[in-house]
Image (spheres, rainbow, N blue to C red):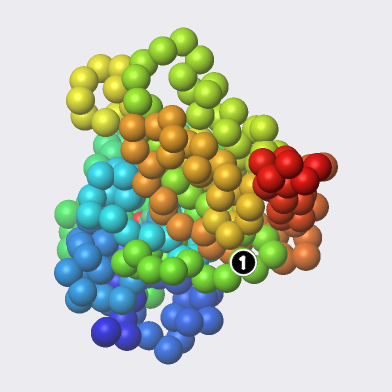
Amino acid sequence: MPASYAYLGPEGTFTEAALRTLPEAATRELIPYVSVQSALDAVRVGEAEAAFVPIENSVEGGITTTLDELVAGAPLMIYREVLLSITFALLVRPGTKLSDIKTVSAHPAAQPQVRNWLKNNLPDAHWESAASNADAARLVQEGQYDAAFAGEFAAALYGLEALETGIHDAENAQTRFVLVGRPARPAAPSGADKTSVVLWQRDDHPGGLRDLLGEFATRGINLMLLQSRPTGAGIGNYCFCIDAEGHISDRRVAEALMGLKRICLEVRFLGSYPRADIKPGDAEQPRLGTSDEAFVSAADWVARCQDGRF
Ligand SMILES: O=C(O)C(=O)Cc1ccccc1
């Protein structure tokens, strides 16, 4: 197994900055890839042990390329998540003034975070999407665009200077990144975990989504993400990406997944992994009647009833 992590590159992405916060990244070779797809494919073909990619941001929601790869591509599993607070710098070739800027570029997920700033400061600039924010910086260096929105730290890598820093339409904007590998046994519960799944409904009926959500609700499981994605089978056909509190080895989570497996056309397990938003020990206690002990004693009671020993 190659001891390398693929990531959305080139060098100087927020993805790379987030990846470097993981202790295990220090012992791996970090290899930049040009797209989320190519980083994930590197894992699928065994070129890399895992890939690190953006999956969600607090301003715009899911990063659809990543969700769609996890939903429809050859199965992969999430092992870790990282949250990074993000503000942008406007990077230009040295000497460029604001009034010189006719074209700006960044990753599409950056646009909702800089839209108001652009309207107020560069209302006539033409937006061009790039494969990543650092790639936009690289293209500015090459002369293809006049300015890029990227991390301030990318300036030195591409011989650029920051004309403006701290650009962010929404206060406290965060992006969530995940470390994705081939399917294997999830790490043991950390005490504050999250489980990701994709659900496909068996048929279209009133309350169909409520039935799916009910499997979590009746077991006291809080949801942290619900994003529908088109299945590609026609208008109105969606699957649901869900992040739920807890680990698959928690009885309530396992029971909810069994319930979903019984009623869904398909359930894809995407992993149980430590939450980045809180530390183990700070997680809420299970709601009344949803602890492992409650499930075990209820199952014992049913077994005794079946045995006539109640
Ligand atoms: O990692 C990057 O730099 C990216 O291009 C992805 C991205 C886009 C917008 C916010 C955070 C990360």
Q: Nearer the viewer, residue 177 or 270?
A: 270
Q: Residue at x 38, y 68 (%)?
A: 184
Up/down of 305 relative to 205, above or below: below
Q: Is residue 174 left or right of residue 78?
A: right
Estimate how packed mark 1 is, as few (under 14), some (14 to 19) or many (20 or more) residues with alpha carbons within 10 Å. some
- The answer to whether any part of residue 112 appears in the image is no
- The answer to whether any part of residue 230 appears in the image is yes
Q: Residue at x 55, y 56 (%)?
A: 248
Q: Quadrant of the N terminus?
A: bottom left
Q: x%, y% of residue 165? A: 52, 57
Instruction: Report which residue position mark 1 lands on.
Output: 189
Q: Residue at x 44, y 46 (%)?
A: 197
Q: x%, y% of residue 70? A: 32, 50
Q: Nearer the viewer, residue 111 or 211?
A: 211
Q: x%, y% of residue 188? A: 57, 70
Q: Give the residue at the far bottom of this rendering.
A: 27
Residue 256 falls in image quadrant: top right
Name the element at disc 1.
loop
Up/down of 17 relative to 163, above or below: below
Q: x%, y% of residue 254? A: 56, 50
Q: Is residue 218 left or right of residue 118?
A: right
Q: Residue at x 63, y 52 (%)?
A: 251
Q: What amino acid is found at the position of numbered circle 1 in the picture?
A: Pro
